[in-house]
């Protein structure tokens, strides 16, 4: 579809407009509405309501995703309210004033009230909502009863007249009286207040109305799928650039106040494929968002599933999973309907409908592209600031829109590029759309075009459409001679390079979803190859189809590519052998994720620049690491054939090592020092019997040995000053554990199911430790807890049948759960 409309080339062609001066702006400017930092400011008398009514109201507002300011400072008598408090009053849309019996006895509360009333006079978008908590509105208005007594004590104060006027003015606003609503039941009363405020808040997604056709789509999704008393998973499916994420965000913003917990998870595809982040980090994000607790730690995907099921059932939640591309992501984040409370909603956006069908998602909304009328309107807003083309530009606008094929991103890009440009520029642009100049050099995109993405690891890159646009430009320069291309991208077709000419420039090669990949009688100089990326390659061993150097089709030989800097063979499932040059001095990234059939990998002897080696899912690979002084990430997850791994003697920059589910791994020889190692994941290495950690791991944050069932010996570093999560769940054979002397940042220690554990020597101080799980440690006889555990919340000794001595810390002020069941 894109090729027919040349929409990508259109984008690239527009970049040349950066050199053309703009005309005087003719677009209409809209009045900017004020953006408030807080939705609600709570004014209250602390000694009356802080830990009772106001505390419960504040929690309810936060659960409804209503940003609320509550001052938790008690001002000493005679002091004035702070500048911060005054700023918070100014920055809040609504002011909820809780009038209680002793409210007027505080000059601070009265000064707050005066400032609130001043804001009402100068800022029309702010509103006051009084709450009368066990006081009559007439007491407040006329300063009688307790309010009268308080003012008798204030009579000499200079501000008393301002205070009286402020009280009279505040009671003139419509509010809520506890004595007359919900029969005085505070829980129901708070629900009513929160619901009323939610309805008064403007929809955060109202700005999306500026995107043509969005309101109709939002209303359709909400009215059709968001039914109040049903659990439902809604799939939003469409091609890239069609507005899936925008629609999901708009729906989320419109309905989020109806739920007790919410989470919008962006870029699921990208984050879940990251070694540093991964699915457990997404589970952790959802739990933190929904429960509004930032100290939740998920140690593994299985642990995350248990936590999701446990906590999601207790509240009605709204979760958006944006850009999902694999069923495993949904299993981790929205596994089963019985995880969720009735009324909860899960919204999934994806380009792949099969992912939704595999997860049995029945409610699927197909995002339609813009109609011609909608496209013209959107282009007009971007280019002219009006609802339709200005006189003289109607025909030009129609021609531009015809190339955009109804994609909002392309239309917005073209419209923004043509904004304030005269008719000659439009005509010239249309010529560029029709034909890319052969001798011109395309300029870089203007700042402010917003055509870049910022990834989770803070790297800048082009939007998918812009990247695709570059591919079309390259291919159209020499449409009949692909060997002159500086890059090649082939989708869903056979590929064959046959040439007798040497390539005279640096060469970039990419193949996607290709069935047959062949170099026939080629003399292409692969020594100039810089970047190789092949996706979903199904290699066929058939006569007549040969790779370079005449090797078999199940083998990829890159011996003549010494200058390559990136090798991406993602999901080349039938690839058996990969030959690499003796030296790859420029190679930085190797991605062999999902190469299930790969049994032999001849790594270069020298890879001085290699940063990332990703062999995730190479099930049959039995390999060893080379000297890689710059290596930061080594991912061997799911390499089930790996029996022994000899790490380089030194890996000074290694940050993440993942051996998750390397079930046959028997030996692991770690480097002597790993000064930058942050994550070590050995979950499911069931055959590993001994682990000698590096002597020094000063940056280690997460150590996961979950389900290392045969682990008998574990030798830890002397110090782990950054260690936060230590997971040994299911290490049944471990009999003794000597932890580092210092673990000042340790938050979670999990030894659940370590049945044979006899000795546990804990650090002297664990000032951040919150959770210790020793459930099922049946052989443990004695436990000396650290002397200082001021943050300890949970100590689980359930099933510690032989425990005779338990020496607790001197103080545990935060301890909530001490489980000695089965003792």
Image (cartoon, rainbow, N blue to C red):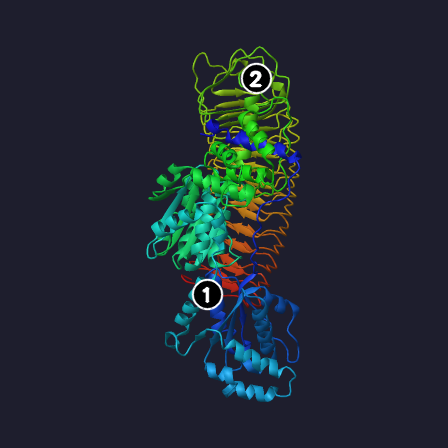
Residue 409: percent from left, percent from top:
51, 39
Among the two numbered marks 2 and 1 on one chain, the one whose residue lies closer to the N terminus: 1
Q: Does residue 146 sit above or below 42 in this rendering? A: below
Closer to the camera, 690 or 135? 135
Farthest-out residue, front: 391
Mark 2 or 1, which is nearer the eye? 1
Q: Position of residue 115 (x, y in %)?
A: 60, 73
Q: Quadrant of the N terminus?
A: top left
- The tally of labels here is 2
Q: Who's the residue at 64% across and 78% down the image?
A: 76
Residue assigned mark 2: 483
Q: Residue at the location (47% across, 75% down)?
A: 131
Q: Is residue 60 visible?
A: yes
What residue would you read off at disc 1? 197
Residue 139 is marked as: none
Q: Residues within 10 Å of mark 1 (few under 14, many from 20)?
A: some
**Helix, strand or loop at disc 2?**
helix
The crowding category of the residue bearing disc 2, from other C-alpha atoms within 10 Å (few below 14, some 14 to 19, many at least 20), is: many
- Of helix, strand and loop, which one carries label 1? helix
546, above or below 17, in the image: above
**Corner quadrant of residue 35:** bottom right
Q: Which quarter of the rendering shows the C terminus?
A: bottom left
44 in relation to 568, above or below: below
Nearer the observer, 158 or 320: 158
Q: Position of residue 649 (x, y in %)?
A: 64, 35
Task: Classify residue 566 by image quadrant.
Answer: top right
- Residue 644 percent location from the top left of the image: 53, 33
State the separation of the CA atoms marked 2 and 1: 65 Å
């Amino acid at each position: 579809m894109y090729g027919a409309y040349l929409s990508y080339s259109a984008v690239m062609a527009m970049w040349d407009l950066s050199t053309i001066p703009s005309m005087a702006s003719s677009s209409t400017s809209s009045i900017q509405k004020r953006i408030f930092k807080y939705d609600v400011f709570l004014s209250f008398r602390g000694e009356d309501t802080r830990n009772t009514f106001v505390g419960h109201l504040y929690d309810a507002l936060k659960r409804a995703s209503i940003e609320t300011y509550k001052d938790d400072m008690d001002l000493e008598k005679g002091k004035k309210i702070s500048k911060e408090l005054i700023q918070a009053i100014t920055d809040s849309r609504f002011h909820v004033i809780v009038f209680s019996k002793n409210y007027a006895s505080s000059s601070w509360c009265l000064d707050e009230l005066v400032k609130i009333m001043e804001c009402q006079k100068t800022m029309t978008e702010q509103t006051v909502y009084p709450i009368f908590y066990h006081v009559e509105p007439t007491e407040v208005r006329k300063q009688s009863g307790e309010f009268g007594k308080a003012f008798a004590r204030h009579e000499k104060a200079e501000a008393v007249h301002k205070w009286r006027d402020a009280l009279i003015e505040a009671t003139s606003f419509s509010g809520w009286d506890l004595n007359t609503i919900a029969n005085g039941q505070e829980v129901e009363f708070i629900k009513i207040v929160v619901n009323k405020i939610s309805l008064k808040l403007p929809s955060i997604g109202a700005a999306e109305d500026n995107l043509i056709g969005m309101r109709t789509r939002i209303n359709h999704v909400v009215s059709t799928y968001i039914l109040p008393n049903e659990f439902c998973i809604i799939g939003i499916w469409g091609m890239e650039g069609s507005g899936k994420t925008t629609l999901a965000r708009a729906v989320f913003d419109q309905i989020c106040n109806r739920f007790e917990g919410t989470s919008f998870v962006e870029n699921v595809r990208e984050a879940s494929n990251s070694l540093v982040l991964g699915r457990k980090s997404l589970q952790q994000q959802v739990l933190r968002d929904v429960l509004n607790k930032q100290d939740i730690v998920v140690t593994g995907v299985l642990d995350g599933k248990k936590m999701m099921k446990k906590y999601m059932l207790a509240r009605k939640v709204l979760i958006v999973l944006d850009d999902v591309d694999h069923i495993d992501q949904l299993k981790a984040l929205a596994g089963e309907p019985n995880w969720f409370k009735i009324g909860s909603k899960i919204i999934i956006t994806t380009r792949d409908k099969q992912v939704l069908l595999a997860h049995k998602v029945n409610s699927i909304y197909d995002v339609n592209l813009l109609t011609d009328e909608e496209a013209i309107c959107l282009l007009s807003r971007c280019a002219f600031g009006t609802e339709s083309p200005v006189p003289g530009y109607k025909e030009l606008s129609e021609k531009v829109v015809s190339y955009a094929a109804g994609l909002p991103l392309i239309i917005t890009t073209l419209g923004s590029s043509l904004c304030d440009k005269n008719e000659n520029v439009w005509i010239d642009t249309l010529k560029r759309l029709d034909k890319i100049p052969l001798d011109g050099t395309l300029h870089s995109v203007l700042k402010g075009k917003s055509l870049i993405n910022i990834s989770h690891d803070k790297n800048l890159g082009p939007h998918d459409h812009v990247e695709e646009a570059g591919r079309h430009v390259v291919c159209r320069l020499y449409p009949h001679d692909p060997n002159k291309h500086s890059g090649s991208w082939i989708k869903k077709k056979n590929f064959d390079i046959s040439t007798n000419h040497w390539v005279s420039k640096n060469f970039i090669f990419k193949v996607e979803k290709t069935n047959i990949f062949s170099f026939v009688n080629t003399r292409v100089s692969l020594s100039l190859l810089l970047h190789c990326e092949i996706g979903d390659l199904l290699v066929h061993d058939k006569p007549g189809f040969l790779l370079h150097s005449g090797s078999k089709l199940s083998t990829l030989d890159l011996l003549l590519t010494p200058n390559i800097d990136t090798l991406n063979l993602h999901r080349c499932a039938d690839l058996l052998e990969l030959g690499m040059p003796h030296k790859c001095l420029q190679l930085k990234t190797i991605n062999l994720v999902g190469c299930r059939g790969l049994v032999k990998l001849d790594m270069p002897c020298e890879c001085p620049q290699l940063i990332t080696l990703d062999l995730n899912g190479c099930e049959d690979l039995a390999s060893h690491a080379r000297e890689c002084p710059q290596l930061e990430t080594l991912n061997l997850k799911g390499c089930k054939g790996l029996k022994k791994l000899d790490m380089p003697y030194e890996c000074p920059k290694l940050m993440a090592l993942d051996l998750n589910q390397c079930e046959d791994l028997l030996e692991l020889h770690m480097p002597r020092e790993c000064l930058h190692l942050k994550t070590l994941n050995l979950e499911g290495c069931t055959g590993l019997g001994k682990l000698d950690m590096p002597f020094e791991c000063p940056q280690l944050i997460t150590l996961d040995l979950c389900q290392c069932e045969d682990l008998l010996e574990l030798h830890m570093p002397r110090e782990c000053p950054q260690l936060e999560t230590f997971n040994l769940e299911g290490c049944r054979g471990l009999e003794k554990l000597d932890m580092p002397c210092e673990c000042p940042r340790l938050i979670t220690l999990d030894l659940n199911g370590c049945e044979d554990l006899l000795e546990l020597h804990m650090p002297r101080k664990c000032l951040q430790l919150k959770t210790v799980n020793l459930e099922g440690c049946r052989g443990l006889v004695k436990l000396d807890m650290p002397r200082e555990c001021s943050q300890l919340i949970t100590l689980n000794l359930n099933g510690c049948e032989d425990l005779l001595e338990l020496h607790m810390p001197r103080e545990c002020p935060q301890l909530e759960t001490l489980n000695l069941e089965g003792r």
